[in-house]
Amino acid sequence: MWLLVGTLGTTAACVVPSFDVAPAPMATGGNATSGSSAASGGASGKPTGGGNSGGKVSSGGAGGTSLAGNLSAAGSEQAGSAGNQAGSGNEAGATGNARGPVRVGISMFHDSAGGDDDASADSVDASFAKPPGTKPGDFMLVFFGADHELNISKAGLAPSGWKLLAEQAGYGTDGQGTYLLYKVATDAEPDPIVFAGVDPKHYGIQGLLSVYRGVDPTNPINDYAANVLKTGSASSTEVETPTPPITTNVDDCLLIAGLSPDTAVDAPTISTWPAGFDENQVSVTNPAHPLPNGWANIYSAERHQSKAGAVPTSAFGWKLTYGGQEYYGSMTFVVALAPTP
C-alpha cells in the first residue's frame, strides 16, 4: 500500500537515503544522507534475495542547489554538493520561448551503491523532496530505475492519486526494473513525497521526480512507447541504445526520453543524447558518497514538438566508465505530454 507521510527526519543515530531537489528558478537542495547495507549476492555479484548480510554503511553527500535554466546534470554530484547542476541557457518555455508544457522543478532520490556488493539500498521507502513552487494542477512524473525490481502495484497507487504508466521488471540477463508513475498535484501534496515499502529487498534504486506546468490534466499522456533490450555484452566500453518511435496527435507536446541501463558496478556517462532532446538533460547517479558508482542509474532529456506527427527513433549513447566492459541490457522510453487545451 502506498502511503504519503510527513516530513522525514534525520538524526545522528540513523542513516537515510538521499534526495536532491532542483527547483526553478533557484532553491537549496534537499537533505542527502544515504547509507546502504549489503543484500544477498546473486549472479555476477548482484543481489537476488531479501534481507541484509551485514554490509557496511556509508553516509551520503549533502544536497546541492540548482541554477535556473536548462538543468544539465552532466555536472558532477560531489561530496557536499550532490545534485549540483550547471545551468546553461533557458529552461524550455520559462521565458516564453516555447509553447506547451514546461518543467518547473525536479527532485532526485538516491539509495544505491552501499554494502560489500556496492549494490544495496538502506531503506524500503523512496522519498522525494517536493520541489518548491509546486502548485495544484501541476503534473508530476516519477521515473524509477532499480536493480532488480520494486514492489509496485496498480492497486496500491490509487489511494494517493498516483497512476502507473510503465512497469518493466526483471529485464536484462541479470535483472533490472524501470517504472514511470504520474499524478496531477493537489493542494495537499506532502513534503517529502514518500512511496512507502516499495523496496522490501533493499535493491539499489535511483529516482527522478519532475514537475511540469501546462499539461492537460484530463488526458496528460498523448503517446508512450518503450524499447527493452534484454541482453547486453561482456566486452563493451560504449553502448548505443535506440529510443522507440512515437506519434503525437496534438501540437505543442513536450517529449521526454529516458534511459535505464542494467550494468555491472558503474555510473555510465552519456556520450550522445537522442537527436533533438537537448533540453533539461539529467543524469541520476550516486553522489560521491556513499559511492560514486552503482548498479542503478537513470537518464532523462526533453524536447518540444511544435507540430503533431511522427517522432523517429534515435538513441542514447553511453560509456562504461568504471573500468569494466560488462552490461546486461537496457531500456529506453519516450513519453509525450499533451498541453493544456
Image: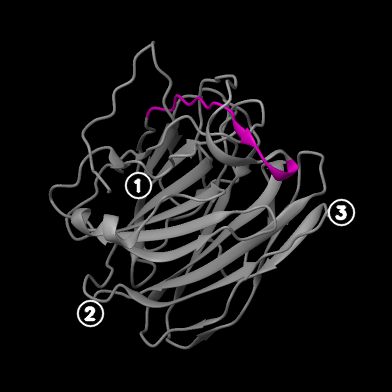
Camera-side residue of 256 and 179: 179
| Separation (CA) of disc 1 from disc 2 | 24 Å
Q: Closer to us: mark 1 or mark 2?
A: 2
| Separation (CA) of disc 1 from disc 3 | 41 Å
Residue contact between numbered discs 1 and 3, judged by CB atoms under 8 Å: no
Q: Which residue is mark 2?
A: 341
For residue 278, say whether it is visible. Answer: yes
Q: Residues within 10 Å of mark 3 (few under 14, many from 20)?
A: few
Q: Secondary structure at mark 1?
A: loop
Q: At 86% across and 53% down in the image, what residue appears?
A: 235
Q: Closer to us: mark 1 or mark 3?
A: 3
Q: Secondary structure at mark 2?
A: loop
Is residue 113 within the magenta segment?
Answer: no
Camera-side residue of 41 and 279: 41
Residue kind at label 2, given as amino acid type:
Pro
Residue kind at label 1, given as amino acid type:
Ala
State which region is magenta: 31-44
Q: Which residue is mark 3?
A: 235
Is residue 38 within the magenta segment?
Answer: yes
Query: Residue 114's x, y, as percent?
Result: 59, 28
Q: At 35% across and 41% down in the image, what residue appears?
A: 197
Q: Which mark is residue 24?
A: 1
Q: Seen in the image, is 14 located left or right of residue 236?
A: left
Q: Secondary structure at mark 3?
A: loop
Query: Residue 185's x, y, as percent?
Result: 21, 56
